[in-house]
Image (spheres, rainbow, N blue to C red):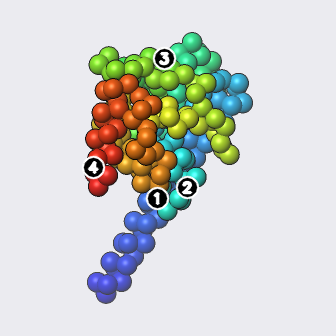
């Protein structure tokens, strides 16, 4: 009896995991499609951008992420709020973060977070976020360019950013030549990742 209960619990867990991943994917696609249809410039950034780049090389190396981060221009915020609201998202500005909850009852973790182009995400960051023009059209959405994405990850350099850099390194998207592309402080951070690929 106990083994059967354990198996049933495992099945339910897998279903919940798959459903959680699918919800994030659908949230990302809805947001991107909404901005596309409204003619608003944007680029997918953050963990989903890393996953999209990694998937081009090795789908098995893709790491799931809960975050949906979209790079936009602040001047477009009124149009973004209008378009996203029509698509069922709920705008909130909380603790200095602009986000769109995925419905009125959604939690902050179930949101699309905006990153503003040309602005520092935090005052202490060395560089501002790139412009939305530093992107390319993928099969399903506009994607931040690889170099711009790596620059953002090096600028914030939190543990999860370092993990994302290791993901890009692991599939050969970045390599030992890449520190030359960045200012000295960011180059040193990337060299640290390159020197310790085991994390």
First in residue order: circle 3 vs circle 4:
3
Secondary structure, mark 3, is loop
Pointer 1 with pointer 3, Cβ within 8 A: no
Give the mark toward the camera: 4 or 2: 4
| Front tag of 3 and 4 | 4
Q: Residue at x 46, y 45 (%)?
A: 174
Q: Is residue 190 left or right of residue 149?
A: left
Which of the 4 image quarters holds residue 11? bottom left
Read off the residue under disc 1.
61
Marks 1 and 3, how far apart in space? 31 Å
Q: Which mark is residue 118?
A: 3
| Marks 4 and 2 in Cβ contact (< 8 Å) | no
Q: Is residue 155 above or below residue 6?
A: above
Q: Is residue 30 visible?
A: no
- Percent coordinates x, y for residue 40 in the rendering: 66, 23
Element at label 4:
loop
Q: Which residue is mark 2?
A: 57
Residue 122: percent from left, percent from top: 34, 21
- For the view shown, which residue lies furthest in the bottom direction? 1
């Amino acid at each position: 009896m106990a083994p059967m209960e354990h198996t049933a619990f495992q099945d339910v867990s897998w279903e919940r995991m798959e459903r959680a991943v699918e919800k994030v994917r659908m949230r990302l696609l809805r947001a991107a499609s909404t901005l596309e249809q409204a003619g608003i410039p944007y680029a997918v950034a953050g963990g989903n951008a890393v996953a999209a780049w990694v998937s081009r090389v090795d789908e098995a190396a893709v790491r799931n992420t809960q975050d949906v981060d979209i790079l936009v221009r602040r001047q477009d915020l009124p149009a973004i709020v209008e378009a996203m609201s029509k698509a069922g998202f709920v705008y909130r500005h909380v603790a200095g973060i602009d986000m769109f909850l995925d419905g009125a009852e959604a939690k902050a973790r179930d949101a699309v977070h905006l990153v503003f182009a040309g602005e520092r995400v935090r005052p202490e960051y060395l560089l501002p976020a790139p412009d939305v023009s530093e992107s390319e059209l993928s099969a399903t959405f506009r994607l931040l360019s690889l170099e711009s994405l790596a620059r953002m990850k090096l600028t914030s350099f939190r543990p999860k950013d370092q993990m994302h850099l290791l993901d890009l390194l692991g599939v050969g998207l970045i390599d030992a030549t890449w520190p030359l592309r960045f200012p000295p402080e960011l180059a040193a951070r990337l060299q640290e990742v390159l020197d310790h690929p085991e994390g």
